[in-house]
Image: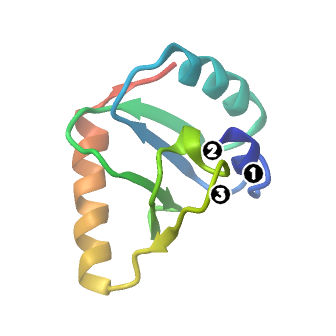
Amino acid sequence: MFDYLESLDPNVELKLLTGQQKPMFRILFVSFAAKQGQTEASFCRDFHDRFLVIDSRKAVNLGTSINQAGKGAFMLNGVTDKHELERLLSEFSTWWNKGQPIM
């Protein structure tokens, strides 16, 4: 996942929220965050799906585990419905505030 994220503009605010505290994620995140500008990660068990929230304005739902991305066909689904996006961003904010920072 971090290989793909490295292609983002370093000015993009990136918040990564994970439901599992895997040691490898922390190791990769620390290295990535040192190179990428506005990047944070946190741990919270209140959700199952995988989401990318970009600049607190856009959201994408990943149709696979992040560690499986690229190993076969999968979908990225942009959350385009205004009300669903507002609800998801609100829930993400709640999860983020309840989470434990990684790093």
> Which residue is rendered at x = 41% and y = 40% of the image?
17
For residue 21, above or below residue 11: above
Tag 2 residue: 38
Left or right, 16 with respect to 37, comes to left
Mark 3 and mark 2 lie on one chain; the one further toward the N terminus is 3
CA distance separating discs 3 and 2: 7 Å
Residue positioned most to the front: 72
**Residue 27 left/right relative to 88:** right
Residue type at mark 1? Pro
Circles 2 and 1: CB distance less than 8 Å?
Answer: yes
Q: Give me the residue at 55% from left, 20% from top.
A: 26
Return the disc, 2 or 1, that comes first in the chain's sequence.
1
Question: Residue under circle 1?
Answer: 10
- Can you give x and y, in whole percent of width and height, for residue 23 in the image? 51, 14
Name the residue type under label 2.
Gln
Q: CA distance from mark 3 to mark 1?
A: 5 Å
* Circle 3: element type: loop
In the rendered image, the vertical position of residue 88 relative to residue 92, given as above or below: below
Q: Which mark is residue 12?
A: 3
Residue type highlighted by circle 3: Val
